[in-house]
Amino acid sequence: MVQLHVKRGDESLFLFNTTVDTPLETLIQQITAIYNGRLKVERLCSEIPELVDHGISLPPNMQGLTEEQIEELNLRDEWGEKCIPSGGSVFRKDEIGRRNGQAPNDKMKEVLMRTVEAATALISKKQVQANVCVTVEMIKEALDQLRGAVMIVYPMGLPPHDPIRMELEDKEDLSGTQASLQVITEDECQLWWAAKEMQRGKKLQDYIGRNEKTKLVVKIQKKLEEADDDSYLDSEWSDRQALKRQFQGLTNIKWGPR
């Protein structure tokens, strides 16, 4: 098997096994799925501790309001009455007003946090050091573990607006967030090796030969989305050599929103 060490910029992400006769379209699809799957697991593992500490998410129209404001506006969280954690709740106020403060008890907290720890280990960058290759199945396993733990603690489910439920149902809204800048769709994705883009329509062996024991570092990045018109030609973006240097990681890049 060919072992790919996948990076974004200088950041080491994961190892992936493939074969020399794999079409680049298939390889890009697989690597993009793992790349974005790891991001989803990371987002869930970042949000679940908030669920543990402060309970379910408040409806969007109640978030950030004081108790007085909620009472004055006659707002009611109907989901708070339905989505009660197993074994009852413990009140821990959310000072920033995103969650309802009805946190799971210590036993249920342990279920969630132990699962977060296990899922984090599956997709950890430490897997590179351990020479463990990440697969799509490992990403699915991590997501299934997290989904199962949430169902144990919240058998009635989470509110449809809770970011954890939205992530698990692939309905997350990342617009305007830092997380949106990290996501790379399959259509946007490019793979680079030895300062060359590995083009769709070719196979891996067209670049590295037929040695199945090859190990190489590839970089994942977004492709340039050119404007629909020619107005950009009058701007500094029209310097294509500068763009090429940017996309080869030779200058700092701040990716725009999806």
Image: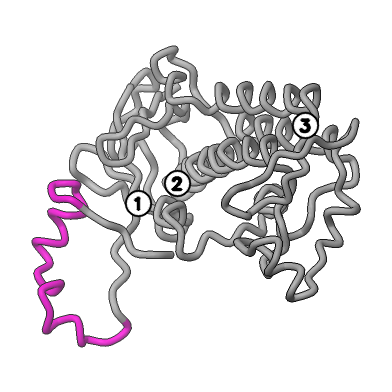
Classify residue 79 as left or right of residue 226: right
Residue drawn at the location 37% of the way across and 18% of the way down:
213
Horizontal and vertical percent position of residue 202: 37, 48
**What element does badge 2 sit on?**
helix
Q: Amino acid at mark 3?
A: Ala
Residue drawn at the location 15% of the way across and 72% of the way down:
237
Q: Nearer the viewer, residue 258 or 233?
A: 258
Q: Amino acid at mark 1?
A: Gln
Residue drawn at the location 47% of the way across and 30% of the way down:
18
**What crowding class fits label 1: few (fewer than 14 Cα within 10 Å), some (14-19), or many (20 or more)?**
many
Badge 3 or badge 1: first in the primary sequence: 3
Residue 160, quarter of picture: bottom right
Residue holding disc 2: 28
Badge 3 or badge 2: first in the primary sequence: 2
Q: Are marks 2 and 1 in contact (CB under 8 Å)?
A: yes
Q: Nearer the viewer, residue 228 or 168?
A: 168
Camera-near label (3 vs 2) is 3
Q: Amino acid at mark 2?
A: Ile
Where the N terminus falls, by quadrant? top left
Residue holding disc 1: 190
Residue holding disc 3: 149
In reply to whether residue 161 is colored magenta, the answer given is no
Horizontal and vertical percent position of residue 249: 19, 46
**What crowding class fits label 3: few (fewer than 14 Cα within 10 Å), some (14-19), or many (20 or more)?**
many
Horizontal and vertical percent position of residue 196: 21, 46
**What element does badge 1 sit on?**
strand
Q: Nearer the viewer, residue 147 or 227?
A: 147
Tell me if residue 210 comes above or below residue 53 in the rendering: above
Classify residue 94 as left or right of residue 110: left
- The prevailing secondary structure element of the residues shown in magenta is helix
Q: Which portion, as a residue range, is magenta?
A: 228-252
